[in-house]
Image: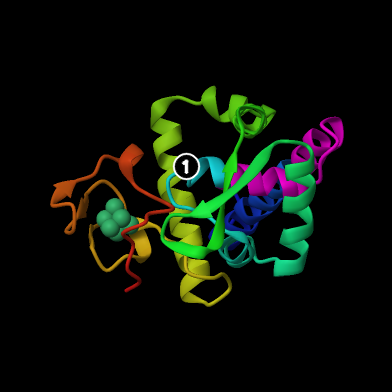
Amino acid sequence: MPSPLEFDAHLAQVLERIGEVARALRWKQAVEEGLSPLQIRIMGFLVEHADEGIGVGRLAEELMVSKPTISDSVKLLADHKFIVRKPDKTDARAHALHLTAAGKKHATAGTPLDAAVAGLTPKYKEALLVGLMGVLESLFRKEAVQVQRMCFTCAHYKGDRDTKHRCLLLEKSLKVAELRTDCAEHEVV
Ligand code: SF4
């Protein structure tokens, strides 16, 4: 029987391995499609924030990459006809990036990791989400990662981070599957 410390180290190792596998799968997908991992991430971000008028600046901030690097990737994606630039509705001088139908198809294609998660029972999916959100919250509190716009770091969250979850802003109890990890209404505690 491992000691609690050994078990913690074991879990951390498994998490690292999952991170490595996710990166490797992203590389493989990117190479197969003639894209870079950053371009895949950009399209993934755009598909998840389709209504928000995302520009180069926001992408640079969210993906923690410099603006010139994002601009280069965006240009290539536009050349591939995966995204188009449209005037931003809220700022006439800015452009918002939108996925084309071909871009959406690429961005929503599942990976083996998606399929692996889909194979878990609802009980394990919920435990995984709550556990991983707890890990991210802890990293955020230790200033090891930037603000995570998720319920556990939100001023509007009230709950036990286990089975009871409530959003004071939305005035409703949240099921585990409804917990958010990228919420537009998030306010940091
Ligand atoms: S505002 Fe969003 S992040 Fe905050 S508790 Fe409500 S649902 Fe969660």
Q: Residues within 10 Å of mark 1 (few under 14, many from 20)?
A: some
> What percent of the width, then of the height, locates residue 30?
80, 38
> Considering only vertical position in the picture, is 164 above or below 158?
above
Q: State the residue lying farthest toward the bottom.
A: 143
Q: Residue at x 26, y 46 (%)?
A: 163
| Mark 1 vs ligand 1: CB below 8 Å | no
Question: What's the magenta region?
Answer: 24-45
Q: Position of residue 63 (x, y in %)?
A: 63, 60
Which residue is nearer to you in this view: 100 or 112? Answer: 100
Q: Which residue is mark 1?
A: 128
Magenta stretch encompasses residue 41: yes
Which sits in the foreground, 23 or 52? 52
Q: Position of residue 172 (x, y in %)?
A: 15, 47
Q: Quadrant of the C terminus?
A: bottom left
| Majority SS type along the magenta span | helix
Count the numbered circles shown. Answer: 1
Residue 23 visible to the viewer = no
Q: What residue lies at 56% left-to-right and 63% top-to-bottom?
A: 58
